[in-house]
Amino acid sequence: MNRVIEQLSTHRSIRRYTDRAIDDDLLHDLVRAGQGAASSSFIQAYSIVHVRDAAKRERISAAAGDQRWIREAAAFLVMCADLSRVARAVRKTRNEELAGWTEHFLAATVDVALMAQNVMVAAESVGLGAVFIGGIRNDPMTVSEVLALPDLVYPAFGLCLGWPDQDPEVKPRMPVDMVLHRDRYDAGRVDADVERYDAMMREYYAARSENRRSTDWSTPTAGAVQDKTREHMLAFLQARGFLKR
Ligand SMILES: Cc1cc2nc3c(=O)[nH]c(=O)nc-3n(C[C@H](O)[C@H](O)[C@H](O)COP(=O)(O)O)c2cc1C
């Protein structure tokens, strides 16, 4: 395995950091690495808001379920899907408006995710720790107000960055043969695969060094999706100009 594959395969989210700062040049390089990601039709439909103001970070942290690491991270970035420049290009060259197509929402959302993952990988390559924060979608309107996000820009998730003050184990992923199908999707094996992975995860949660739990994969997964439906999202996104058709 080369270093890149080794690093990608041993990612862990880091939620506890030392007091050391991240200098501006490094942050600039991380964003530049993020921008190196591929982009659907080269639309580059993303923007990042670096939240430096402590009071703003406090408000966002409260909106995101009071996650301590949002306040404590050396840097907190809000990763936004951003169609505002694309809309400008359409208006400028064709005198037309973007119409809120689902396809454009998907393209912008994929773009911001790829860019953000590049930032995380680049950060980890220099020894930083990182964790994404989907919790900001608990209250996307407050986050948008705090950051003055205009129409056609939505806060997809946050990214905390800092020098690690913890060393958690890598969470075991699903075995490759569970996620890799050959030539056709094999729907018949889902039940057995989930059983197998539940057993693996039960072992991992019981044995890990911090925050041991008696659980498997299915139980917290079901809780996460059924209890975290964020019913406001469709109306919020539509109010911002996304997902109208
Ligand atoms: C889009 C996205 C949103 C996430 N949101 C949160 C969050 O709000 N708070 C948090 O502590 N972790 C969050 N995470 C981290 C996941 O919980 C974590 O990646 C997952 O449990 C796997 O653990 P690992 O990253 O340590 O391998 C998020 C991850 C992703 C990809």
Image: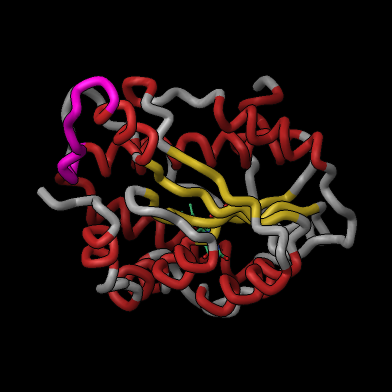
Give the magenta part as a residue range: 92-103
Q: From the viewer's perspective, is 36 left or right of 181?
A: right
Q: Is residue 168 visible?
A: yes
Q: Is 31 a magenta residue?
A: no
**59 up-or-down from 234: above or below:** below
Q: Position of residue 242 (x, y in %)?
A: 24, 51
Q: Relative to the observer, which residue lies in front, 49 or 20?
A: 49
Viewport quadrant of the N terminus: top right
Numbered-mark total: 0
Residue plotted at (25% across, 20% down): 93
**26 up-or-down from 134: above or below:** above
Q: From the viewer's perspective, is 187 left or right of 90?
A: left
**222 up-or-down from 108: above or below:** below
Q: Position of residue 189 (x, y in %)?
A: 21, 46
Q: Position of residue 188 (x, y in %)?
A: 15, 45
Q: Please identify the quarter of the rendering in which residue 78 is found.
A: bottom right
Instruction: State how the image is colored.
Output: secondary structure
Q: Please identify the quarter of the rendering in which residue 171 is found.
A: bottom right
Residue plotted at (77% across, 54% down): 162
Q: Relative to the observer, which residue lies in front, 84 or 126?
A: 84
Q: Is 102 a magenta residue?
A: yes
Residue plotted at (41% across, 67% down): 140
Residue plotted at (65% across, 41% down): 10
Q: Position of residue 235 (x, y in %)?
A: 22, 67
Instruction: Determine the residue located farthest toward the right in the rendered image.
Output: 20
Q: Is residue 212 visible?
A: no
Q: From the viewer's perspective, is 17 left or right of 19?
A: left
Q: Relative to the observer, which residue lies in front, 123 or 182?
A: 123
Q: Please identify the quarter of the rendering in which residue 179 is found.
A: top left
